[in-house]
Image (cartoon, rainbow, N blue to C red):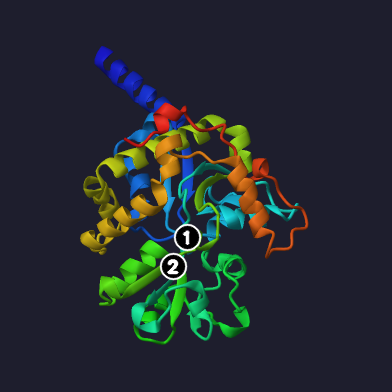
């Protein structure tokens, strides 16, 4: 009888503990590919669980889609393009979704082509065909890229193409260049048997587009009613990125568990490319993961305004909050 009572008590305690975990549905921007590894590392190493969170992660269909998924309440948190969030927040009728952690300090936005197409600089796009999915986060910055580089946009033919056929069409010569996240397009071209030395990448930030990239966002009600969960998610994600940066070869295993049909060597290289260029920049090495320079963010908002007509222009504080970030020393990349 005493043993039975102990078993019941233990079961009740376990159930009570389980009930304390806060469920967090997290919407990725894209498929389960290399750059998503840090989130799965945080799951596999128990970092989210240690913060009292039960995290589930779903793939996405573009770096803009996640905003609506979070705003609708279908997901408590998501991963999406901060520049699209700025435009979204311009409409006062939209819910005040806010970014709580910067992930891509340098955006992955790019124009990708092949050397044989002769596109070595932005102006070379004139007279060419640019393949761009309408929902692509990189294509959303095309007007800024055009203005910053004084491109005659009337001389560039834009062809709306689907994400799945974007790189194949470039490889087959059906378009001269494409917009996209550079590490994905680069690796997808490699998968289409295009040699690495034949691929040309114009990083938009290297050509006048001084914007940030993808952020972690939270639903406003979740921020209000579960601030501890938001802070815990941010803290655990930072630990996942730190571990991934320290040992990408081990981190990619967490990704491969969720996408067994992917090629490990491809996703590992995709991950390493994104870590080097987008996750861990000079600013991140100095200031730590997750932070934003609010003056730079204000400049980004102004730059977006060069090609986007604001009706209720947001301020940097409307878009990003640092209140959920742990101290700098806990955010440094070792």
Q: Is residue 144 left or right of residue 61?
A: right
Q: Name the residue rendered at 53%, 52% in the picture.
A: 212
Of the 4 image quadrants, the one containing the N terminus is: top left
What is the quadrant of residue 185 in the picture? bottom left
Up/down of 313 relative to 189, above or below: above
Q: Position of residue 230 (x, y in %)?
A: 52, 36
Up/down of 249 relative to 196, above or below: above
* Residue at the disc numbered 1: 206
Q: Position of residue 66 (x, y in %)?
A: 53, 56
Q: How many marks?
A: 2
At label 2, counting other C-alpha atoms closer than 10 Å, the crowd grade (few under 14, some 14-19, many 20 or more) is some
Q: Name the residue rendered at 61%, 78% in the picture.
A: 153
Q: CA distance from mark 2 to mark 1?
A: 7 Å
Q: Name the residue rendered at 29%, 16% in the picture.
A: 6
Up/down of 51 relative to 116, above or below: above
Of residue 76 and residue 312, the one placed in the foreground of this image is: 312
Of residue 27 and residue 333, the one placed in the foreground of this image is: 333
* Residue at the disc numbered 2: 202
Q: Name the residue rendered at 46%, 66% in the picture.
A: 110
Dot 2 falls on a residue whose secondary structure is: strand
Confirm or deny contact between disc 2 and disc 1 (CB under 8 A): yes
Q: Position of residue 229 (x, y in %)?
A: 50, 33
For residue 173, which numbered disc appears in the image?
none
At label 1, counting other C-alpha atoms closer than 10 Å, the crowd grade (few under 14, some 14-19, many 20 or more) is few
Q: Can residue 98 be seen at all in this image of the molecule?
A: no
Q: Position of residue 149 (x, y in %)?
A: 57, 69
């Amino acid at each position: 009888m005493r043993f039975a009572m102990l078993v019941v008590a233990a079961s009740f305690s376990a159930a009570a503990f389980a009930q304390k975990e806060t469920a967090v549905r997290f919407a990725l921007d894209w498929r389960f590919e290399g750059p998503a590894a840090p989130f799965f590392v945080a799951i596999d190493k128990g970092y989210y669980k240690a913060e009292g969170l039960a995290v589930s992660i779903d793939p996405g269909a573009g770096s803009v889609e996640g905003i609506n998924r979070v705003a609708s309440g279908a997901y408590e948190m998501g991963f999406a393009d901060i520049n699209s969030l700025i435009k979204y927040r311009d409409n006062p009728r939209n819910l005040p979704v806010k970014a709580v952690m910067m992930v891509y300090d340098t955006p992955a936005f790019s124009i990708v082509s092949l050397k044989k197409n002769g596109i070595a600089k932005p102006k070379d796009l004139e007279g060419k065909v640019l393949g761009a999915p309408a929902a692509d986060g990189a294509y959303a910055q095309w007007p800024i890229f055009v203005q910053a580089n004084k491109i005659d946009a009337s001389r560039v033919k834009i062809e709306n193409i689907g994400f799945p056929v974007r790189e194949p069409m470039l490889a087959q010569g059906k378009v001269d260049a494409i917009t996209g996240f550079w590490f994905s397009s680069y690796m997808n071209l490699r998968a289409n048997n295009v040699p690495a030395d034949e691929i040309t990448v114009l990083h938009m930030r290297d050509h006048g587009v001084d914007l940030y990239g993808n952020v972690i966002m939270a639903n406003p009600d979740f921020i209000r009613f579960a601030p501890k969960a938001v802070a815990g998610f941010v803290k655990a994600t930072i630990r996942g990125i730190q571990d991934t940066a320290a040992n990408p070869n081990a981190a990619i295993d967490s990704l491969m568990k969720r996408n067994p049909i992917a090629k490990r060597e491809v996703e590992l290289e995709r991950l390493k490319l994104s870590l080097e260029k987008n996750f861990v920049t000079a600013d991140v090495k100095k200031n730590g993961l997750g932070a934003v320079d609010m003056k730079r963010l204000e400049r980004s908002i102004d730059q977006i305004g060069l090609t986007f007509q604001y009706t209720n222009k947001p301020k940097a504080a409307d878009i990003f909050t640092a209140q959920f970030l742990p101290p700098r020393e806990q955010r440094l990349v070792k």
